[in-house]
Image: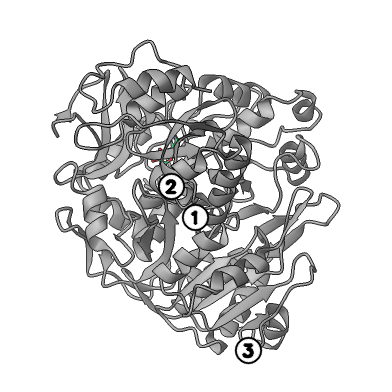
Amino acid sequence: MSNYHIKHLEEYFQVYRKSVRNPEAFWEEVAEEHFFWRKRWDSVLEWDFTKPEIKWFDGAQLNITENCIDRHLRSRGDKTAILFEPNDPKEEAQHITYHDLHERVCKFANVLKDQGVKKGDRVVIYLPMIPELAVSVLACARIGAIHSVVFAGFSSTALATRINDCEAKIVITSDGSFRGNKTIDLKGIVDEALKQCPGIGSVLVAKRTGAKIDMMEGRDHWLQPLLDKAYADCVPEIMEAEDPLFILYTSGSTGRPKGMMHTTAGYMVYTAYTFKNAFQYREDDIYWCTADIGWITGHSYIVYGPLVNGATTVMFEGVPSYPDFGRFWEVVEKHKVTQFYTAPTAIRALAKENLDFVTKYDLSSLKVLGTVGEPINEEAWHWYNDHVGDKKCPIVDTWWQTETGGILISPIPFSTPTKPTYATLPMPGVQPALMDENGKEIKGNQVDGRLCIKFPWPSIARTIWGDHQRYKDTYFSAFEGKYFTGDGALRDEVGYYRITGRVDDVIIVSGHNLGTAPIEDAINEHPAVAESAIVGFPHDVKGNALYGYVILKETGESRDRDNLKKEINQMITEHIGPIAKLDKIQFVPGLPKTRSGKIMRRILRKIASKETDNLGDISTLLNPEVVEQIIEESL
Ligand code: 6R9
């Protein structure tokens, strides 16, 4: 029996039991059967969650791009690897075969080398969803450079923080990007960011919109002429199993973003394995994940997982509402998509529109539907199931994180019976635990607690770039010897997991993780603001929206409130990006605080959600009188 493709529930349980009884033997068998190694590992796993230190397949040598590309050339050279669907439906889709991809990645890799990029150097990629994004990621991996993709919706300040944090040498960007009927001046944002980034020696610019942009002599280079001159083959750099593959930033509950560092071998094995199983991918399927490669979902399940499996992966440049709300379904019909993977926020937005946008397209090619990014509510789940899947396609509600590298809890389609709002069962090799507030594991079923993982899986992030102590404090200190996810979960009577949401100060808005601290820091920079607190409140499309409580300085009291609100959102847009804008801003005389000076966000959350009947005991607050006033003036 091969461990690689699970076909029914009994088999899942068999494989699962085997995987936890002897995880090393399990992953060794997977690694042996399905990948191309330059040298075999000396040991499968070494780990110590107290340090924490985790090594998978130590001693092995490989290059992930040989697994993603070269090894498919003989059997699948003319098969489409990347199917690029442009923003404008009138522009023709591009079918990039494995042969084409090989050539494009090799040329790009040679351009990077010419720019002086070497193994271990950091390359920041700030590109829209165009083929160059996937190609540049793979080109970095080809030469052993560490890519750090920054989502092209982030502001210049956010970009600069990330460039400086990982001490990148070079930035890859484009002249602009198309999103719906908007064009965005990405190069302008990069120019602004680079004023604060002395370490950047060169910028490679892909042409997309044709907009007129400034090119700084000696620093900025158009990409295409360099590619045209580059040699079409590039010998892959031989990487150690634990050499870094990429850094990807995620929001934390405090201060600076965390550069999650992923390494090569374990990440490859795990994303390939979970891609195959969670989507029941078969040769000739057309798989489409609508995420952006700027997020972990795009890294693992648009680029690496699908390509290691030799799949055809769709890359979509546009948005679900352009030219109208039928765009996703038009693309599904056009390319005969078989697996479709998106976020609950997109489903909720589309479910609000006329059903004709869905019914007018032939969606019969679909076999499996997926969701990721936040809990999916029951209504959205049923709409997806009824109208997109025609009740025939299992929905895989996949729970995982930037830190986990790959899917940890998810149904296996056609094996695990689905249950709305439940991510159901752990992937093979994944050992979840629910913990109570005193740090004790809660055994049995029909219980809820804080979600931890007891044992390493191959794609767990190895550190926070440049700050191992923070990695330890954030993930391995709350519960001794366990990885703490930051999420709460419940386990039902049959052992299915349902993720109930974050238990820390991270708020998920439209599937994007936003830490409260960086937003508050941005607001507090406004000269009229003394202090602020951000909480989430339920929103029918975005899942959560942001509610800001702001204390003004005396100098701000006389200012026009509507203008102030605009300026505050402008500050946020500049520091983080438009995704972090506040839906509601309330000016308050004070914030409820504990005697030790901590803001009682629990109370602010209830007020924002209009659940003020049961605020709990507020008498221990430093300033209970402020609560009444905030409630009276709440929006
Ligand atoms: C892959 C990704 C991670 C956080 C995670 C959790 C939430 C993701 C979910 C889900 C409920 C799901 N989350 N998938 N919550 N059900 N299926 O989204 O990574 O951006 O790091 O977010 O997203 O709260 O902790 P990332």
Residue 104 position within the rendered picture, expressed as x and y whole percent measured from the top left:
65, 74
- Return the mark for residue 218: 3
Alpha carbons under labels 1 and 2: distance apart: 8 Å
Q: Earlier in the sequence, mark 1 or mark 2?
A: 2
Identify the residue at image location x=58%, y=84%: 110
Q: Which residue is drawn at 25% across and 48% down?
A: 475
Ligand 1 within 8 Å of the CB at mark 1: no
Whether the residues at callouts 1 and 2 have beta carbons within 8 Å, the answer is yes
Q: Which residue is drawn at 45% across and 32% down?
A: 536
- Residue type, mark 3 in image: Gly
Q: Mark 1 points at which residue?
A: 305
Comparing marks 1 and 3, which lies closer to the viewer?
Answer: 3
Residue 391 x, y percent position in the rendering: 61, 22
**Mark 2 lies on residue:** 274
User: Element type at marker 3?
Assistant: loop
Residue 46's place in the image compared with 115, above or below, is above
Res 103 visible: no
